[in-house]
Image (cartoon, rainbow, N blue to C red):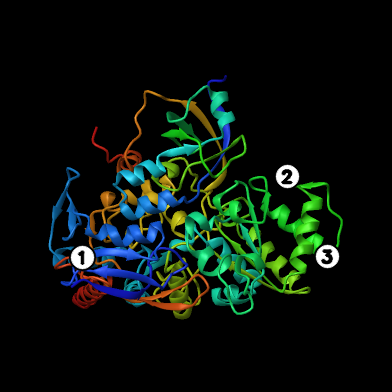
């Protein structure tokens, strides 16, 4: 068991994310579908966490609290996935290699358990970064 | 009596299914049921009856709350912002009609805006590659009727284009594909074993970020060249085997998605996928199609291309000519470098889908968002102008992922008093003209 692990992160669409998005960005469906990190069971074991534990994910760009879950879209150990959305984008680098396309897939992140930390709502996670969130 | 509207076009993904059947109440105000749509499409139509829809423009107050204002006030604010700003980012367009786009472009020409669409964070890399090497492509109808070798590379249509497989690429029986699924060989190349991989005959698990190497190996194998023992986690025997199978097909197609456009290499990944397709045409008929995401992002590329010659990131700030340079006139770069003075978003939600650094920059500028719903962008904008949903409450032209134009239909009336994108943009254009004449 280790305190934090380094994983390779990708962000993609999932059908739950699509349905949630159409239900509304402020809906529970969207929150449930996107404020998660999908991890391999071995990585969870390594980190000493159970499914549905909140974790803090940190990249060179930033940091965000999401819920660790397992998935049907089977991952290999070392690979993790956060569905596209405001939570994922808190840690996505805006560097585009002159293509206009940010680094949405394939960047290292550190994951550590954060069972006592709260996950912000979709709007708040953006407002928080922009300094518009009233504490 | 409730009535049934048939052949409705679904305004969600680039597949643009046009066989939906929607039952609406006799007063034409409420959707009662949706047939034939996927889970996402059904949600899009069904949630129109949910309460809490915004029906008046809103302006953000200094304390962070929103105050209702009239359309006239909102349009005046927008027009003044556009006229004042020397360089405005006008981003979005992928979820509105081609008619609305052309009005928006007229505004951009007047005020010197930069028009960019969602391809900039989606298939922008593909468009760069297509400009570099061209694209041997076909329509989805040809896939349905002819394709017997189908590759899904870095895409997961089971989740992102849910009816693509049943309408065109895997299951349907067509003129030359009478056996349907049984007559086709399906391949899936991905770093995850996705739901699409589950319906494929062959799944090739590539290590994340090694798509370029693997495509290069496919090219080499097609020409009979030697390969190292393993390429991106895939044994060379597998590569030779798959390429031989592809050569025996009568009509092959590669569908590719964000797995190629977002990973390291970006446009070069697409470049080599297209080159592999071209190579395969030495042996059989082969095509390649981008799995476009938003339902009308292709349309925005089409309209921009025929008006200015470039498919996205068109800089009109020099007023007399259009410029396009990825990395320079693309939205994320413009925002992170703080190069625009105001932001105008329409039919999109960059707040949810842009890297946060871009949105932090955006939140410090005057911003207007035109969108039917409350989303992550409207809440950090100065003014939010709600509109009718295109494809549900008003019609308009859209382009499918294979560049086929399809007319979307109006199914129900929008909530009372709500304007359409076209109406709002026309009024902004008129106000801009007025203000410029006065100046």
Residue B344, given in percent of the width and then of the height, sits at: 32, 61
Q: Which residue is mark 3?
A: B223
Taking depth in this image into account, of B347 and B45 the one nearest to the observer is: B45
Q: Which residue is mark 2?
A: B233
Count of all numbered marks drawn on residues in the image: 3
| Mark 3 vs 2, N-terminal side | 3
Q: Quadrant of residue B81?
A: bottom left
| Mark 1 vs 2, N-terminal side | 1
Q: CA distance from mark 1 to mark 2?
A: 53 Å
How packed mark 2 is, by other alpha carbons closer than 10 Å (few <14, some 14-19, many 20 or more), is: some
Host chain of mark 2: B
- Which residue corresponds to the image point at 79% horizontal and 57% vertical from the top-left? B241
Taking depth in this image into account, of B229 and A101 the one nearest to the observer is: B229
Tell me, yes or no, whether the two marked residues, 1 and 2, touch with CB atoms within 8 Å.
no
Q: CA distance from mark 3 to mark 2?
A: 21 Å
Host chain of mark 1: B
Residue B30 badge: 1
Q: CA distance from mark 3 to mark 1?
A: 59 Å
Foreground disc of the pair 3, 1: 1
- Which residue corresponds to the image point at 63% horizontal and 71% vertical from the top-left? B179
Compared with B251, B378 (above or below) is above
- Which residue corresponds to the image point at 62% horizontal and 57% vertical from the top-left? B153
Mark 2 element type: loop
Answer left or right for B140 relative to B277: left
């Amino acid at each position: 068991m280790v305190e934090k692990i380094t994983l390779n992160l990708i962000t993609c669409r999932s059908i739950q994310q699509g349905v949630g998005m159409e239900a509304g960005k402020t809906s529970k469906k969207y929150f449930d579908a996107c404020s998660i990190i999908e991890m391999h069971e071995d990585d969870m074991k390594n980190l000493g966490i159970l499914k549905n534990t909140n974790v803090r994910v940190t990249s060179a760009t930033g940091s965000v609290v999401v819920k660790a879950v397992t998935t049907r879209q089977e991952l290999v150990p070392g690979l993790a996935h956060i569905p596209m959305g405001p939570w994922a984008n808190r840690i996505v680098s805006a560097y585009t290699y002159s293509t206009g396309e940010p680094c949405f897939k394939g960047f290292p992140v550190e994951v550590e358990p954060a069972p006592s930390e709260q996950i912000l709502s979709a709007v708040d996670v953006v407002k928080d970064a922009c300094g518009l969130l009233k504490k | 009596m409730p009535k049934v509207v048939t052949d409705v076009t679904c305004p969600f993904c680039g597949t643009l299914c046009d066989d939906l059947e929607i039952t609406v109440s006799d007063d034409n105000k409420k959707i009662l049921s949706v047939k034939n749509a996927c889970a996402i499409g059904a949600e899009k139509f069904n949630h129109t009856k949910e309460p809490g829809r915004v029906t008046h423009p809103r302006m953000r107050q200094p304390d962070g709350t929103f105050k209702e204002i009239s359309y006239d006030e909102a349009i005046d604010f927008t027009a003044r912002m556009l006229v004042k700003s020397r360089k405005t980012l006008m981003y979005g367009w992928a979820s509105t009609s081609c008619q609305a786009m052309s009005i928006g472009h007229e505004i951009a020409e007047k005020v010197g805006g930069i028009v960019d669409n969602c391809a900039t964070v989606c298939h922008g890399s593909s468009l760069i590659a297509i400009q570099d090497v061209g694209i041997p492509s076909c329509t989805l109808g040809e896939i349905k009727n002819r394709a017997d070798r189908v590759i899904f590379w870095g895409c997961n249509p089971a989740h992102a284009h849910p009816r693509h497989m049943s309408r065109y690429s895997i299951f349907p029986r067509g003129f030359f594909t009478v056996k349907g699924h049984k007559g086709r060989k399906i391949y899936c190349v991905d770093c995850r074993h996705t739901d699409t991989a589950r319906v494929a005959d062959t799944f090739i698990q590539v290590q994340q970020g090694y798509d370029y190497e693997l495509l290069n190996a496919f090219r080499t194998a097609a020409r009979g060249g030697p390969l190292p023992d393993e390429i991106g986690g895939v044994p060379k025997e597998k590569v030779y085997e798959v390429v031989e199978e592809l050569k025996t097909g009568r009509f092959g197609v590669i569908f590719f998605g964000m797995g190629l456009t977002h990973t390291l290499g970006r446009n070069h990944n697409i470049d080599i996928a297209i080159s592999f397709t071209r190579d395969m045409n030495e042996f059989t008929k082969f095509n390649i199609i981008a799995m476009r995401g938003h339902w009308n992002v292709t349309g925005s590329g089409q309209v921009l291309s025929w008006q200015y010659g470039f498919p996205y990131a068109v800089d009109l700030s020099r007023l007399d000519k259009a410029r396009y340079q990825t990395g320079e006139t693309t939205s994320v770069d413009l925002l992170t470098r703080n190069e625009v003075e105001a932001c105008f978003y329409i039919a999109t939600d960059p707040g949810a889908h842009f890297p946060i650094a871009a949105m932090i920059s955006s939140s410090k500028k005057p911003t207007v968002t035109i969108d039917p719903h409350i989303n992550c962008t409207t809440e950090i904008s100065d003014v939010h102008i709600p509109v009718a949903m295109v494809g549900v409450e008003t019609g308009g032209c859209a382009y499918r992922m294979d560049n086929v134009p399809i007319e979307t239909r109006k199914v129900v009336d929008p909530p009372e008093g709500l304007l359409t994108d076209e109406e709002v943009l026309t009024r902004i254009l008129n106000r801009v003209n007025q203000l410029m004449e006065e100046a």
